[in-house]
């Protein structure tokens, strides 16, 4: 009996000691977890914002052909936009990973025969010309014949692109008789760069004249004389339900459409010859644009609203892509001598507003750009009527490349 009692006491003592040790080990493990090093920094915070966002994009989209949240590779304008930013980051840092990211896109999308995967010439879609800038950058470096063949294919689209009776490019074959502000960015910098690289004499002169003419038409038909702002689209036939029956313009001023147009002007001037008479005209258009856009800048935040002239009307919001595009346009315009110095203050105020209101950083250093309008257009199916309600109710998402690309470009211009 005493043996059993003693054995029981020994078991109780052993169980108690084991429990105490177990609790102690658990506490030690908790302490170890608390003392563990912080999450690994994928994007170092001591880099400039331009590089931090570029690395974040590469983390989100390891394959440049799948930018814009795609499951399959696609030839599209958003790829060209972000890769223009990657090119400029590469030129500033000389880090091979950025060049490789650009090259991998072209390598994936252009076949050995120079065909472009997912591209259809028959669509006559101006958007598809923008990624041609990637090939204009790579071809002189690589001398790969397939890139040249792909460039010739894209350039052939300009020859067959449907036009209004005034000579303006339709935005797409399916958008009959319509010029959109977006299209000036998609087509004209590519058209001008290609001309500079491959054309001479009268052929080059005619191309440059044609490029300037596209801007002339937008200024004549899409500009609101009262505010100086430009409407998203112009239907030369005045048949679309969204088109004003007298002017043919859509009814609202969409932030990103104006952003595309501003970037188109400062970028096309990189390639338009110094002695071309249209150069001063585009610089004048840019100054008028800057004056009008500055008037609708939100005074408190420094940002711009989705519908530019509607301020804090119910449903309207401060939108990231347009704000980033305007920042880039103003900063580059000043640095190039096209705009007065006062617009650099506008750009700096806007950039600070983006950082303060629209940027968030994850624990691993990945940078997010928030409040980007995912997409907006005119007509189509389901029909987009260009009303105020339409623009403010389109999907909003973070890290849309139509915002991140311009944010990187703006960061580079401001050396931030």
Image: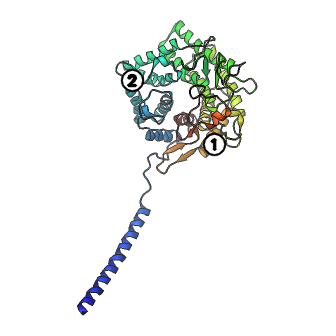
Above or below 207: residue 313: below
Vertical relation: 118 (above or below) 357: above
The N terminus lies in which quarter of the figure?
bottom left
Q: Secondary structure at mark 1?
A: helix
17 or 288: nearer the viewer = 17
Q: Which quadrant is home to the C terminus?
A: top right
Q: CA distance from mark 2 to mark 1?
A: 39 Å
**Which residue is the site of mark 1?**
353
Picture residue at 65% right of the left edge, 39% below the top: 303
Q: Is residue 140 left or right of residue 179?
A: left
Per the image, the residue denoted by label 2 is 110
- The disc placed on residue 287 is none
Q: Nearer the viewer, mark 2 or mark 1?
A: 2
Residue 249 in the image: x percent, y percent? 68, 22
Q: Is residue 200 visible?
A: yes
Q: Secondary structure at mark 2?
A: loop
- The quadrant where residue 388 appears: top right
Q: Is residue 344 visible?
A: no
Binning the other alpha carbons within 10 Å of mark 1 as few (below 14), some (14 to 19) or many (20 upward) gives many
Query: Image height check: is 191 above or below 312?
Result: above
Image label count: 2
Where residue 281 appears, as percent x and y from the top left, is 66, 17
Q: Position of residue 228 (x, y in %)?
A: 72, 26
């Amino acid at each position: 009996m005493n043996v059993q009692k003693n054995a029981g006491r020994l078991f109780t003592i052993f169980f108690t000691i084991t429990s105490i040790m177990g609790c102690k080990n658990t506490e030690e493990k908790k302490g170890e977890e608390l003392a563990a090093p912080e999450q690994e920094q994928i994007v170092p915070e001591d880099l400039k914002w331009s590089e931090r966002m570029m690395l974040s994009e590469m983390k989100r989209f390891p394959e440049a052909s799948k930018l814009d949240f795609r499951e399959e590779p696609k030839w599209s304008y958003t790829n060209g936009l972000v890769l223009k930013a990657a090119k400029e980051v590469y030129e500033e840092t000389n880090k091979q990973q950025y060049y490789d990211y650009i090259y991998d896109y072209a390598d994936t999308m252009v076949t050995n025969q120079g065909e472009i995967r997912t591209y259809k010439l028959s669509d006559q879609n101006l958007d598809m010309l923008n990624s041609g800038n990637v090939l204009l950058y790579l071809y002189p470096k690589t001398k790969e014949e397939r890139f040249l063949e792909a460039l010739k294919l894209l350039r052939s689209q300009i020859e067959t692109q449907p036009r209004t009776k005034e000579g303006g490019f339709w935005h797409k074959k399916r958008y009959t008789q319509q010029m959109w502000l977006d299209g000036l960015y998609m087509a004209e910098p590519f058209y001008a760069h290609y001309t500079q690289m491959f054309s001479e004499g009268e052929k080059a002169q005619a191309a440059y004249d044609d490029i300037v003419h596209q801007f002339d038409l937008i200024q004549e038909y899409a500009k609101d004389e009262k505010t100086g702002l430009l409407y998203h689209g112009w239907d030369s036939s005045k048949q679309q339900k969204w088109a004003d029956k007298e002017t043919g313009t859509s009814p609202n001023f969409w932030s990103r459409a104006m952003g595309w147009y501003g970037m188109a002007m400062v970028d096309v001037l990189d390639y338009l010859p110094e002695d071309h008479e249209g150069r001063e005209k585009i610089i004048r258009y840019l100054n008028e644009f800057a004056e009008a856009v500055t008037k609708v800048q939100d005074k408190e935040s420094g940002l711009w609203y989705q519908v530019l002239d509607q301020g804090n009307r119910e449903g309207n919001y401060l939108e990231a892509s347009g704000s980033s595009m305007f920042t880039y346009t103003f900063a580059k315009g000043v640095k190039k001598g096209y705009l007065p110095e006062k617009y650099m203050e506008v750009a700096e105020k806007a950039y600070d507003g983006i950082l303060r209101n629209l940027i968030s950083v994850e624990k691993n250093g990945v940078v997010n750009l928030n409040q980007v309008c995912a997409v907006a257009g005119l007509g189509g199916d389901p029909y987009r009527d260009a009303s105020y309600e339409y623009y403010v109710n389109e999907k909003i998402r973070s890290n849309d490349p139509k915002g991140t690309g311009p944010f990187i470009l703006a960061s580079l211009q401001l050396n931030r």
